[in-house]
Image (cartoon, rainbow, N blue to C red):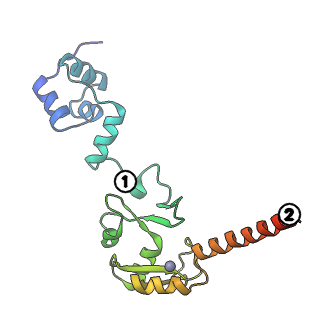
Amino acid sequence: MKKIKLNSDELSQLYLHDKLSITKISTKLKVDSSVVRKNLQLLNIPVRSPREAVILAWEMGIMPRGATHPYWQGGKYTDKFMGYVLVYIDPSDPLHVMTRTGKNYAFEHRIVMAKHLGRPLMPYELVHHKNGVRNDNRLENLEIYSRSEHNEVHRYCRGCPIKNELRIIKAKLKKFEHLAQISLC
Ligand SMILES: [Zn+2]
């Protein structure tokens, strides 16, 4: 293969300053990508690892995000610990202010309520699941409360998940006590 010497200033400008990928540079300079790679080596410019390249592409906004991303899962997932559903909110969406800091996901129940009200929710506004099922985000299952109102609701709410869990534990304990008594007799 014929050795092609690229202009070193131009190459370092494109790769280090403009942060173009080897593929982009090869297209721009109308040479094979192996030529670009070889020339970078000659200049002792370290070639970015695939991981570095991905991070860079992401930072520069070249990497497709959201629905256009090849790994797109539908923009929804359930939080394993809390059981709440989180939805992807595009940064251009006015409701993006409701996403968790540094992330593009917001609680679905809050988004459903915000869309219903036509405005983003304030942090002190809480959305309650009437039937206590945290991933049942139908509008008819949701109610908006202030924090103190919400506390009151949970005090008397029969469908609250924590109260339900407590009820189950208490029932199990009762059964266990009952069995323990039998074995003692
Ligand atoms: Zn609640």
Closer-to-camera residue (126/106): 126
Residue 148: x and y in percent read 40, 84
Label 2 to label 1, Cα distance in Å?
64 Å
**Whether residue 146 can be seen here:** no
Q: Is residue 82 left or right of residue 98?
A: right
Closer-to-camera residue (32/142): 142
Q: In what element is the residue under mark 2?
A: helix
Residue 134: x and y in percent read 55, 72
Q: Quadrant of residue 21?
A: top left
The answer to whether residue 132 is above or below residue 184 is: below
Q: Quadrant of residue 30?
A: top left
Q: Which residue is mark 2?
A: 184
Q: Is residue 140 left or right of residue 101?
A: right
Looking at the image, the residue that sits furthest to the left is: 9
Q: Which mark is residue 5?
A: none
Locate the C terminus by quadrant.
Answer: bottom right
